[in-house]
Amino acid sequence: MITVRDVFEGNKRHVEGDTGELYAAHLKGQAPTLCVVYCSDSRENIHIISDIEPKMGEIFAIENAGNVVDGSVSAVGAVMYCLTHLKTKELLVLGHTGCGAVTAVFGDYKADRECISEHIKVLENVRRIALHVVSQMEGRDISIDEIANSDKYLSLASEINVDYQCEFVKLMLEREGIEGVNVVGAMHDLHGIYGSNNGGLYLTFGSGDDPDVKRKLVDYGSGRTVRDVMDELDVCFYSLE
Ligand SMILES: [Zn+2]
């Protein structure tokens, strides 16, 4: 069990063990090579799941419940600051199976405290797109409750959320005239829904050649993207309304 005390005691060891080189190399500013948006869920840790040793100054991280960008003023500001001012050229939006925030928008989230429900509300576009896409995939009208009670459908909705947030950032970049940013979306498969192993990372949006990595649960049909589905449904991004 980790506590605040552990953090402060660890910091003492950190300061005592520093030779001066670490901070000397980073005092003038930051130039992260990767911007990551991922969920606040305590099981989501970019360093652990990627087996990358944490290093100062490399990753610009934005964490919130549901890895949202659209509709979150702080997330939009942080992402765009990183991609425009710091000129970071890669963005990864990382969702995960069993996401509580995505699950919440398919439930009675409005009964929760306003401060929480106002955050979940920004996922309503994702709920609308997911209802439409799942209904198309199944060939019948799927209800909100059916999605809420299906781990597979909820994972699919989380994947749609990733694609949706990626499309939003791409549109923001287009509007700002920013080119050359590689926007990638992926799902962290905590529950082994995409593959037989727990913990696999699967590319769902953007470039990638590895067929084992590039696996999607969502088929938008006929080569359509999530933005095509949004156009059909006349869904607008919250922050651009
Ligand atoms: Zn989550």
Image (tube, rainbow, N blue to C red):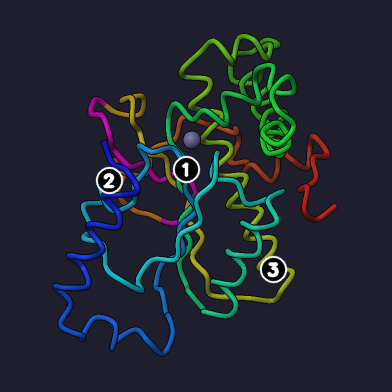
Disc 1 CB within 8 Å of nearest ligand 1 atom: yes
Type of the residue with mark 1: Ser
| Residue 142 vertical placement versus 228 (above, below) | above
Q: Position of residue 100 (x, y in %)?
A: 52, 28
Is residue 197 shown left or right of residue 127? left
Q: Measure the alpha-carbon separation of dots 2 and 3.
A: 31 Å
Q: For the N terminus, give its image quadrant.
A: top left
Q: Position of residue 177 (x, y in %)?
A: 69, 76
The answer for how far apart the CA atoms under marks 1 and 3 are is 28 Å
Q: How far across and how far down the image is residue 139, in percent? A: 64, 13
Pointer 1 local density, CA inside 10 Å: few below 14, some 14–19, many at least 20: some
Q: Earlier in the sequence, mark 1 or mark 3?
A: 1
Q: Nearer the viewer, residue 240 or 111?
A: 111
Residue to which mark 2 is pinned = 49
Pointer 2 or 3: first along the chain: 2
Q: Secondary structure at mark 3?
A: helix
Q: Is residue 128 visible?
A: yes
Quickly name the residue at label 3. Answer: 174
Q: Closer to us: mark 2 or mark 1?
A: 1
Q: Nearer the viewer, residue 156 or 38?
A: 38
Residue 196 placement (x, y as % from top left): 24, 25
Along the line of sight, the residue nearer the viewer: 236 or 105: 105
Mark 1–mark 3 CB contact (< 8 Å):
no
Image quadrant in which you'd find residue 141: top right
On the question of residue 206 being in view, the answer is no
- The residue drawn where x is 22% and y is 65% is 12
Figure disc tally = 3
Labels 2 and 1: the sequence-earlier one = 1
Give the distance between the C-alpha atoms of the residues marked 2 and 1, in whole angstroms.
14 Å
* Region in magenta: 196-207
Res. 40 mark = 1
